[in-house]
Image (cartoon, helix red, strand yellow):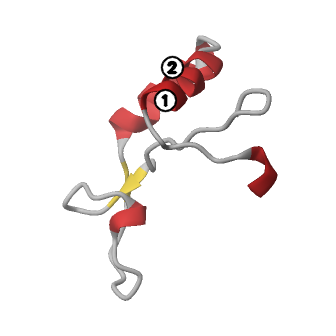
Amino acid sequence: MKGGMAAFYPSLYVDLNGEDVARVSSGKHRPLFLDQTRYDQLLLLIQTHGIGHAVSSIRSSSDGWIPMELL
């Protein structure tokens, strides 16, 4: 989130096939694992204060945003 903007970020957890938690059917229980690459990318964004830029980029290039009124 940045100011009045927010953006989706890929889940840090995936199943054995590399599928996001959001894509895993709710009727199936699969073990989930930390995706180290996604974790490292998020950590780098935090350490370099790049979240604001990433939110702006994601919002300008996709429909992956959440209006603040819904939060």
**Within-10-Å neighbours for mark 1: few <14, some 14–19, many 20+:** some
Name the amino acid type tagged 2. Leu
Residue placed most toward the observer, 38 or 56: 56
- Can residue 71 be seen at all in this image of the molecule? no
Mark 2 and mark 1 in contact? Answer it, CB < 8 Å.
no
Q: Nearer the viewer, mark 2 or mark 1?
A: 1
User: Residue at position x 42%, y 64% from top?
Assistant: 22
The residue where tag 1 is placed is 58
Name the amino acid type tagged 1. Ile
Quadrant into which the N terminus falls: top right
User: Residue at position x 35%, y 45% from top?
Assistant: 35
Where is residue 25? Give x, y as percent: 34, 78
User: Residue at position x 58%, y 39% from top?
Assistant: 7
Residue placed most toward the observer, 67 or 48: 67
Q: Mark 1 falls on what kind of element?
A: helix
In the image, taking residue 71 as reference, residue 57 lies left or right, namely: left
Q: Quadrant of residue 5?
A: top right
Instruction: Say whether disc 2 or disc 1 marks the residue closer to the N-terminus.
Output: 2
Q: Quadrant of residue 36?
A: top left
